[in-house]
Amino acid sequence: MPHSRIEIINMLKKELAFLEHGGYGGRSPWRPVSMFLDSPSCPNRLDEERSTPCSQCWLFEFVPERFHQEMEACHFIPLNAAGESVHSMSRQYTTAEVEAALKTWLEAEIKHLEALEKKSARGSN
């Protein structure tokens, strides 16, 4: 499901706002929260059957091809230059550290895509 660059920027900004406003801050103490999956961004957030394939989620374009078949594909998005992801980081870092890496990634992606959008807009004038 392709989205425009502007739509992706706006969705990244919404994800960042969700994170910054404590969206993953344990609002459901009866179970651990999961980055991306417990976000309003996830099409399966309130669907226990997980009926929407990950490939239809806007985050899927950030998932490296070798992880496209994973059940929670968004957990394999590289969040830093070392290629660490929510999947790998959650096994060795605190939730706060994973959230910090996610925030850094979101901010970098927004900046990168906005620069591309600006360059594209200049080129079409």
Image (cartoon, grey):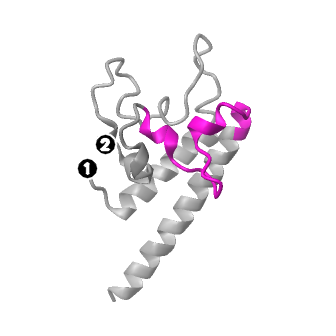
Q: Is residue 101 left or right of residue 60?
A: right
Residue identified by numbered label 1: 1
Q: Local crowd at mark 2 within 10 Å, few (<14), some, or many (≥20)?
A: some
How far is the residue under mark 1 from the one under mark 2?
A: 8 Å
Closest to the observer: 101 or 111?
A: 101
Closest to the observer: 88 or 99?
A: 88
Closest to the observer: 93 or 110?
A: 93
Q: Quadrant of the C terminus?
A: bottom left
Instruction: Indicate the position of residue 55 as horizontal and vertical percent values.
Output: 31, 42
Q: Which residues are magenta?
A: 72-97
Q: Is residue 80 left or right of residue 76?
A: right
Q: Residue at x 71, y 33 (%)?
A: 92
Give yes or no for contact between labels 1 and 2 (Cβ–Cβ under 8 Å): yes
Q: Residue at x 32, y 85 (%)?
A: 124
Q: Could you say whether the residue bearing mark 1 is in a helix, strand or loop?
A: loop
Q: Is residue 97 left or right of residue 37?
A: right
Q: Amino acid at mark 1?
A: Met
For residue 27, the mark is none
Q: Amino acid at mark 2?
A: Ser
Instruction: Indicate the position of residue 79 as horizontal and vertical percent values.
Output: 59, 50
> How many numbered marks does the figure carry?
2
Q: Tell whether position 120 is magenta.
A: no
Q: Looking at the image, which residue sits at the far top?
A: 30
Q: Residue at x 66, y 30 (%)?
A: 91
Q: Is residue 23 left or right of residue 68?
A: right
Instruction: Indicate the position of residue 6 as horizontal and vertical percent values.
Output: 38, 62
Label located before the other in sequence (1 or 2): 1
Instruction: Indicate the position of residue 118 as horizontal and vertical percent values.
Output: 45, 77
Whether 37 is drawn above or below 17: the answer is above
Residue identified by numbered label 2: 55
